[in-house]
Image (cartoon, rainbow, N blue to C red):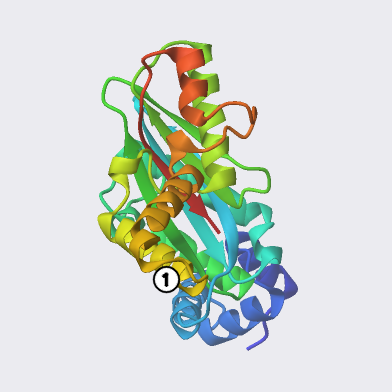
Amino acid sequence: MSITAKEVQTLRQETGAGMMDCKKALAKSGGDIQKAIEILRKRGEKLYKLRSGRENTEGVVCATLSSDSPEEAVLLSLTSETDFVARNEEFRQTAQQILRIAAEEKPRDTESLKALKLPEGILVEEKISHLVAKVGEKIDIGAYKRLHAPGGRVVPYIHAGDKLGVLVALSERGDEKIEELGLDIAMQVAAMEPIAISEDKVDPKVVEKELEIGKERARQEGKPENILDKIAQGRVKKFFKDKVLLQQVFVKDNSLSVAEHIKKVGGNIRILDFLRLSI
């Protein structure tokens, strides 16, 4: 049957799919717009499955406070195969839509998030599938994380370029000074990639591995066997200074450690936790 340009345009406006895809879907549906929409949706699902083995190396990271409390915040990434798609305005709007519903509904995991219904009446998973059909590459929720600070506040931070985000949980809510401190710590986490807040929070297996590496390096340097342990301990202390948040040199003032900066600004304020997410 003959498909008119007006029908193709109507379907394009409805779905955002390409002209040839719309024309093929209309031909297959016998000109029925609703059936054609369903065909395009199924194409998105099929395309997603076909490209499921592809690696998503691009995307955006976004963060927001939960809708009802500064004690909790959400951090998530929406990923794509190419930076071209990641810079697309609809892709970014979709990421923000998913972020808002996650902040409101507080799903327990990524699969639960995908099963939530968006205000426009479709599931998050369907929304992603529709976008896949439009752009022709794999799109997915790369990660979904929540952070809670009972009695305190969580400060979200998105680094320039939207490829990196951080949440920092502080023990107090306070005022603008507390929020500024949270942003300082978040930027520290973004730049320096600490593995733990303090020494006692570092995985013992990591410490054990660093001790082994320190001893072996010292041995290869020809150091006497009876002082290898002492040398290894010294190198682990240096490792802590590089990798433990409170011991790191503060990026905005190299004369201070992060712990010293916190004491200078807020006295008894504690960092309860942090999360870092990057594309």
| 194 and 157: which is toward the camera | 194
What residue would you read off at disc 1? 216
| Residue 185 x, y percent position in the rendering | 51, 32
- Residue 84 rendering spot, x and y as whole percentages: 71, 65
Q: Amino acid at mark 1?
A: Glu
Looking at the picture, tell me which residue is in the foreground, 269 or 37.
Answer: 269
The reply to whether residue 106 is visible in this rendering is no
Observer able to see residue 227: yes
Q: Which of the pair 186/235 is nearer the observer?
A: 235
Q: Position of residue 227 (x, y in %)?
A: 38, 59
State the residue in front, 105 or 241: 241
Image quarter of residue 27: bottom right
Residue at (33% x, 53% y) in the render: 113
Judged from the image, the secondary structure of the residue bearing numbered disc 1 is helix
* Residue sitting at the far top: 175
Instruction: Classify residue 110 by image quadrant.
Output: bottom left
From the viewer's perspective, tell me whether residue 108 is left or right of residue 60. Answer: left
- Horizontal and vertical percent position of residue 167: 45, 38
